[in-house]
Amino acid sequence: MKNITVLDHPLIQHKISLMRDVNTGSKEFRELVSETSTLMCYEALRDLPVKQVDVQTPLGISSTQVLSGVKLALVPMLRGGLGMTDGMAEMIPAAKVGHIGTFRDPDTTNAVDYYCKLPYDIADREVILADIMLATGVTAVKAVSKLKEAGVKKIRFICLIAHAQGIEAINEAHPDVEIFCGAVDNDIDEKGYIVPGFGDAGYRMFGTK
Ligand code: URA
C-alpha cells in the first residue's frame, strides 16, 4: 500500500468509534459522519499552496499567508458520500459540488455507472472524491476514471474506513490519487462489506437498504 494516509487525530478516531457502535442511531450517525468529514477534509488539505502577502493590521503590517487560488470541487459518491458533503464544505465553502453514482454489479463484480453530474469547470479544479467506505475499490476506481476523463488532474480520495483491497485497487489503477482514511479494517465479507466496519453505511445513515 502506497498512497494512503490514516488520519489518526484523536477526534477523528473518537467519532469513528462512536459510529461503529451498533447502538448509534441514524440521526447521530449522520451528525458524526458530517463532523468527521470536516476534520478529515481539514487534514487532507494540508498541502494546499499558499502565497505570502502583506496585511495591514490595526498595529502594523503582517507578512502572512493566504491560499494561492487553487479551485476545489467536492465529489461525493452516491449514496455514502452524500453525508460527507456538508461537513467538508464547512472547510471549503467556495468548492463546487459534483455527484457520481456507480454500483458494483453483484454478478459480474464490475462497476456500473448510473449517475454523473460534474461542475462545468471541473477540469480546472482539484477534486476531493468522497465515500464513507473503501471496500473492494471497484466503484472508487471507476469514479476516479470518470473524473480523469473529465480532465481532472489532482484527486484526493477521502473515506472513513478502508480495506487493503480497495487501497491496492486505487493504488494500482490510479497511483497518483492520494487516499485519506480514518481506519483500515481487516476483513471484507461475501457481500463486500468491511468487517468490523460500520455495516451497511447507507442503512446506518438513511435507514433504507
Ligand atoms: N458499503 C457499505 O455500506 N458498507 C461497507 O462496509 C462497504 C460498502
Image (cartoon, rainbow, N blue to C red):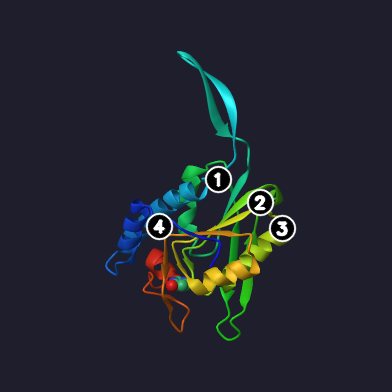
Q: Which residue is mark 1?
A: 47
Residue 119: x, y in percent?
Answer: 66, 51
Under mark 4, the amino acid is Val
Question: CB atoms at circles 1 and 3 under 8 Å apart?
Answer: no
Q: Is residue 39 left or right of residue 56?
A: left
Under mark 2, the amino acid is Pro
Label 2, label 1: how far apart the Cα atoms are: 23 Å
Earlier in the chain: of badge 2 and badge 3, it is 2
Mark seen at residue 119? 2
Residue 53's place in the image compared with 198, above or below, is: above
Q: Which residue is mark 3?
A: 150
Q: Secondary structure at mark 3?
A: loop
Earlier in the chain: of badge 2 and badge 4, it is 4
| Residue at left offset 33%, top offset 66% | 20
Q: Which residue is mark 4?
A: 33
Residue 36: x, y in percent?
Answer: 40, 54
| Residue at left offset 49%, top offset 53% | 85
Residue 144's place in the image compared with 95, above or below, is: below
Q: Nearer the viewer, residue 208 or 205?
A: 205
